[in-house]
Amino acid sequence: MQTYLALARLAFQRQFAYRAANLAGLATNAFFGALRAYVLIALFNAQGAERVAGYSIRDAVTYTGLTQALIAYIALWGWWDMIRSIRTGEVASDLSRPVDYFGYWCAQDVGRAAAHMLWRGLPMMALYALFYRIALPPTVLHWLALIPALALALWVSFGWRFLVSLAAFWTHDAVGIGRAAWTLTVFLSGFLMPLAFLPPWMKAVMSLTPFPAMVNTPIEVYLGLMDGSALLGALAVQAFWVIVLYALAQTVLAAGVRKLVIQGG
Amino acid sequence: MSLYLRLISVSIRSQMQYRFSFVVDTLGSAFATLLEFLTLAAVFSRFGSIGGWTLGEVAFLYGLVEIGFATMDIVFSGFDPGYFSQQIRRGTFDQFLLRPVSLVLQMFSSEFILRRVGRIAQGAAVFAISLALAHIAWTPGKLLYLPIVLVSVVAFFGGLFVIGATSCFWTVESLEVINVFTYGGSAMLAYPMHIYGDWLRRFFTFVVPGALLIYYPALYFLDKPDPIGLPRFVSFLAPLAGFGVLAVAFAFWQVGVRKYTSTGT
């Protein structure tokens, strides 16, 4: 456990070195947030109703800020660290460490994510609060529920990113596979538009995948769109995916390590 | 010109060497735009229109921007600020200066990222959807102007790329703010300009004149009046705006090269 904390802390501190890049990234995120807010406002104005699928205009604008704030936190645009380490051969020394390989990367990801929440996520919401009237979680319970929702969202995202990165054990084209995987993630997670706005059949199909648990769920928890048993159910679904992806990851990893050892010695 | 084509064909052939890799890479990048548009189309049924524009009309803007930007992305790959900053950092740009071939020609032929062709295909698909949905009254004038607009769009975004690359002569790392103009600009121009706030609209009409390349020509093609009330001839300023930006960009480039070569790296 000490090792994991140390790895996380180092990854957290590492982000401090990138604070200029993070600030610049924040500016870009803010610009795109503003664009998406304008689009949603225009859509709502065309519709004329006060609420659409439970969302008010304020909820919709807040949604654009929250999704932009989550980008860095769950590495939504892509995560290449592990694939790179496998390509360069660093993986050999990583695997021989007395730490579980999954845990090794997970701990670092948690550290990185915490730093990104601090440097990108929270400042984004602060900027939004400055320029827009944003929605806030309606009750103390919703504020508290945000903690497990965000933690589980990160772990679901990490489990998926780890699994995808394992492709590098088998092929040189892991980058291409990664690109396709991250595109799929963005599309199915509820990042582009609230899933509630999609036709019910589309939303139902997407809910069969782990991706809504990464973005749509924590946002709907924040906006207070779920109460009581529905809220618990959503968190349970997130936990379900964390476990499933973890089990898959370890299984595929075992196969990958065997292949690596047989190939390279 | 024939030298350029020969260099490009070498680049293409080397990218095609790993055929599976190329296919995976192309497909991986291929679906992002299409999925984004499909998401918009999926929610459109709830809202009906955006800024008074129908889905088919928005698709016209969307498709036009995507085809133009994606084409630029391939042709101007050598000036992609992200890649160019690497060239500067590694010192490989210096080799260009030593060769007895035009610098600009080398820049254009240094990269030709074919996998980005997937994005052109998507743009074309969205544009085709627009042609099917929006009932455009085609005239010989419009048919003549359309390819002019497309080429102008390529010139416009190409100019932004060149400006971004030139800034690397001073900052080495490419400036994040350029991404706001290129990627942010293309995202913004995919929707009718009047949904945006005054400051944003005026900036992208008069300072970084993207609107003159997409929105105002679209008003002409779709026979729509300008809610902001600018005169009709503004729709025909696309080539002036596009090549004007490109000319300014290359003037800036010359300044940058002179500065780089005079400081005796």
Image (cartoon, grey):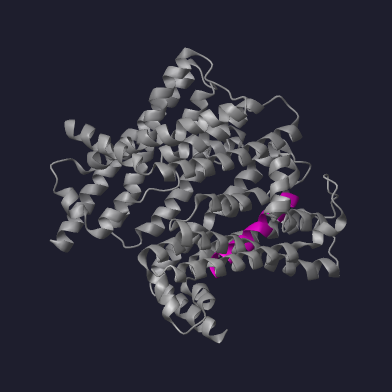
| Residue found at the far top of this picture | A140
State the quadrant of the N terminus of chain A.
top left
Q: Is residue A258 above or below residue B84?
A: above
- Is B220 on the left-hand or right-hand side of A157? right
x 19%, y 52%: residue:
A257
- Quadrant in which residue A30 is drawn: top right
Q: In the displayed structure, does residue A139 sit left or right of residue B52? A: left
The percent coordinates of residue B85 (x first, y second) are 44, 61
The answer to whether residue B131 of the structure is visible from this angle is yes
Percent of width and height locating residue A27: 53, 42
Residue at point 32%, 45% (across, down): A162
Q: Which percent across, then down, holds residue B195?
A: 73, 41
> In the picture, residue B61 is in which quadrant?
bottom right
Is residue B138 in the magenta section? no
* Residue B59 visible, this angle: no
The answer to whether residue B183 is above or below residue A201 is below
Q: For this view, does A104 lie left or right of residue B65?
A: left
Q: Which region shows up in magenta?
A: B56-75
Q: Nearer the viewer, residue A82 or B47?
A: A82
